[in-house]
């Protein structure tokens, strides 16, 4: 599944084209993806102006001028591409996997107008694990996937003091605590591994060990909070990890996957200078964890 930086990369690629445009026509080529499309989907969005493109955790939010928001999830292989006029969508960059352009996988097409300019935003999803729902903007916090979500790792609400309040007395392994979406929204497996490595913290240690007896964050929790922010910011700047099928809106892949420090580097030397350790892979709650036991304590 795409992680937060991938979704943010897509949002930033789509926003300049979609925001302020009007949906003149919505073409849907099948009745469902992972879930059925909303009843009357086309009729409810056609003719509406797109006010903004947002993101909550790993979901895209397309806000319309009639009080409705399209909630979109990319699933495992979903991607958007932008086509203007009769020109083929530009696809710069080197491909890890070619993007699907097979028309049978083009499931949703937004025909947009902005004055005389016409653009098509095409959602392609070979595996059909993505989905689109319609939610009233006033009820967005009640949407099941958003209810109870923690703060974003990119927002000001994420602080060492906040994490201390969530980790106090918690014997759960640190990695599992960080993956809890009720603690931090949208923080996924790859970037937890990377943040813990940067912080020299073992994924196996209890989350409560980063909190003082008075419930205050220890210096290590200050460092971890900073590294969570930094690893997400670095990934967004690089276009996301873009593993396997995920592709940016212009067709190119992000390049952060080439600079992972610990994720998917089992058996390689730790990249911290003078560490001398080797990256190990273990399984925690069914997920692969990569870390260096020599320097992550």
Image (spheres, rainbow, N blue to C red):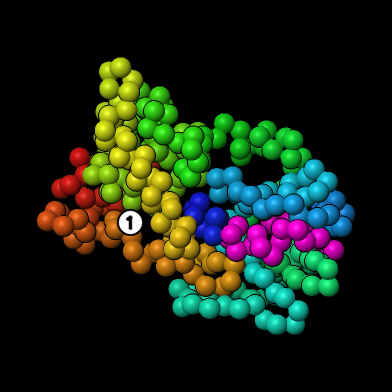
For the magenta stretch, what is the residue range? Answer: 10-36
Res. 28 in view: no
Query: Which residue appears at 33% of the width and 20% of the height?
Result: 215
Query: Which residue appears at 26% of the width and 35% of the height?
Result: 220
* Left-right relation of 296 to 223: left
Q: Relative to 161, say whether 16 is above or below.
A: below
Q: Where residue 270 sits: x, y (%)? A: 20, 57
* Left-right relation of 89 to 246: right
Q: In which quarter of the image is residue 200?
A: top left
Query: In the image shown, does 67 or 267 lie closer to the viewer?
Result: 67
Q: Residue furthest top?
A: 214
Q: Quadrant of the C terminus?
A: top left
Q: Quadrant of residue 9?
A: bottom right
Rate crowding at label 1 as few (under 14), some (14 to 19) or many (20 or more) other CA atoms within 10 Å: many
Q: Where residue 44 sits: x, y (%)? A: 85, 51
Q: Relative to 175, say whether 210 is above or below.
A: above
Q: What element carries label 1?
A: loop
Res. 177 in view: yes
How many callouts does the rendering have? 1
Query: Which residue appears at 67% of the width and 53% of the height?
Result: 53
Residue 56 in the magenta stretch? The answer is: no
* Residue bearing mark 1: 263
Query: In the image shown, does 16 or 64 lie closer to the viewer?
Result: 16
* Left-right relation of 137 to 278: right
Query: Which residue appears at 65% of the width and 59% of the height?
Result: 15
Q: Where residue 88 sits: x, y (%)? A: 67, 81
Q: Where residue 78 sits: x, y (%)? A: 60, 62
Q: Relative to 143, say whether 247 is above or below.
A: below
Residue 25 in the magenta stretch? The answer is: yes
């Amino acid at each position: 599944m795409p992680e937060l930086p991938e979704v943010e990369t897509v949002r930033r690629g789509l926003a300049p084209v979609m925001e302020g445009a009007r949906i003149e026509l919505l073409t849907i080529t099948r009745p469902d993806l992972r879930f059925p499309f909303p009843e009357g989907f086309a009729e409810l969005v056609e003719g509406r102006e797109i006010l903004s493109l947002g993101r909550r955790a790993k979901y895209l939010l397309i806000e319309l001028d009639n009080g409705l928001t399209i909630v979109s999830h990319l699933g495992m292989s979903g991607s958007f591409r932008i086509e203007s006029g009769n020109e083929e969508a530009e696809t710069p960059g080197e491909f890890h996997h070619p993007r699907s352009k097979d028309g049978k996988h083009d499931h949703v097409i937004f025909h947009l107008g902005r004055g005389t300019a016409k653009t098509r935003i095409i959602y392609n999803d070979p595996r059909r694990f993505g989905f689109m729902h319609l939610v009233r903007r006033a009820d967005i916090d009640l949407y099941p996937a958003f209810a109870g979500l923690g703060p974003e790792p990119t927002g000001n609400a994420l602080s060492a003091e906040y994490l201390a309040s969530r980790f106090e007395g918690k014997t759960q392994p640190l990695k599992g605590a960080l993956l809890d979406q009720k603690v931090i929204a949208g923080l996924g497996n790859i970037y937890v591994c990377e943040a813990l490595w940067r912080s020299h913290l073992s994924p196996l240690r209890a989350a409560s060990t980063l909190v003082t007896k008075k419930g205050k964050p220890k210096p290590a929790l200050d460092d971890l909070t900073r590294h969570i922010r930094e690893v997400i910011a670095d990934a967004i700047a690089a276009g996301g990890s873009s593993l396997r099928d995920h592709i940016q809106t212009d067709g190119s892949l992000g390049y952060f996957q080439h600079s992972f420090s610990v994720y998917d580097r089992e058996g390689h030397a730790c990249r911290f200078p003078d560490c001398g350790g080797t990256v190990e892979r273990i399984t925690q709650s069914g997920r692969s964890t990569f870390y260096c036991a020599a320097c992550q304590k």
